[in-house]
Image (cartoon, rainbow, N blue to C red):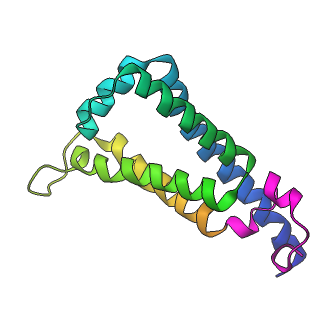
């Protein structure tokens, strides 16, 4: 790989990781600041009853995950968990996009944004070894992938 391309890959992954972490971070902050909204979402989309303490616990867990993603700490675990969390959202949002006969619902185009976002999480996970501008990348000795 040329040195120019080699420098652009970590920069591109930093940009992707930053915006995906901010995306996830806003949901964790909402769970902490508006636990009733999180309870309504859990009930309406996931069919779960979510008491306020559970909303706070999920908010804290998602906050930790968001910060780990933002900083690139334990990349395999944090990127994988972020992908898993968002995968659940994508699966649940499927019924927001289509009626029982598989026809697209009009006016629910916002839910389509979950799919390219999922693609971003999947791409980041698959390229985590090249995401060297991270806490993990700075702690690790130079690997052949990053040389």
Query: Residue 126 location in percent, x, y?
Result: 60, 69
Position of 87 with respect to 147 (left or right) is left
Res 134 → quadrant: bottom right
Residue 144 in magenta?
yes
Residue 130 in magenta?
yes
Q: Which of the two residues, 16 or 52, is positioned nearer the viewer here? A: 52
Query: Residue 57 location in percent, x, y?
Result: 49, 30
Q: Which of the two residues, 146 or 97, is positioned nearer the viewer here? A: 146
For residue 144, above or below residue 14: below
Q: Is residue 134 visible?
A: no
For the point 74% across and 53% down, the residue is: 14
For residue 45, above or below residue 122: above
For residue 108, above or below residue 127: above
Q: Residue furthest left?
A: 101
Q: Quadrant of the N terminus?
A: bottom right
Q: Quadrant of the C terminus?
A: bottom right
Position of 106 with respect to 114 (left or right) is left
For the point 46% across and 49% down, the residue is: 85
For the point 31% across and 33% down, the residue is: 42
Res 131 → quadrant: bottom right
Q: Which of the two residues, 73 or 116, is positioned nearer the viewer here? A: 73
Position of 20 with respect to 133 (left or right) is left
Q: Which of the two residues, 96 or 125, is positioned nearer the viewer here? A: 125
> What residue range appears in magenta?
128-147
Q: Is residue 132 visible?
A: yes
Query: Residue 4 location in percent, x, y?
Result: 87, 71
């Amino acid at each position: 790989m040329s040195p120019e391309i080699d420098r652009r890959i970590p920069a591109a992954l930093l940009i992707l990781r930053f915006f995906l972490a901010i995306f996830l971070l806003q949901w964790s902050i909402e769970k902490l600041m508006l636990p009733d909204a999180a309870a309504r979402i859990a009930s309406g989309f996931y069919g779960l009853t979510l008491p306020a303490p559970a909303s706070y616990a999920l908010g804290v867990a998602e906050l930790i995950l968001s910060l780990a993603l933002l900083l690139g700490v334990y990349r395999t675990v944090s990127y994988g968990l972020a992908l898993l969390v968002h995968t659940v959202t994508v699966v649940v949002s499927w019924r927001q996009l289509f009626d029982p006969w598989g026809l697209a619902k009009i006016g629910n185009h916002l839910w389509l944004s979950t799919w390219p976002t999922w693609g971003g999480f999947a791409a980041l996970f698959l390229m985590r070894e090249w995401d060297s501008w991270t806490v993990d990348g700075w702690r690790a000795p130079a690997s052949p992938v990053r040389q």
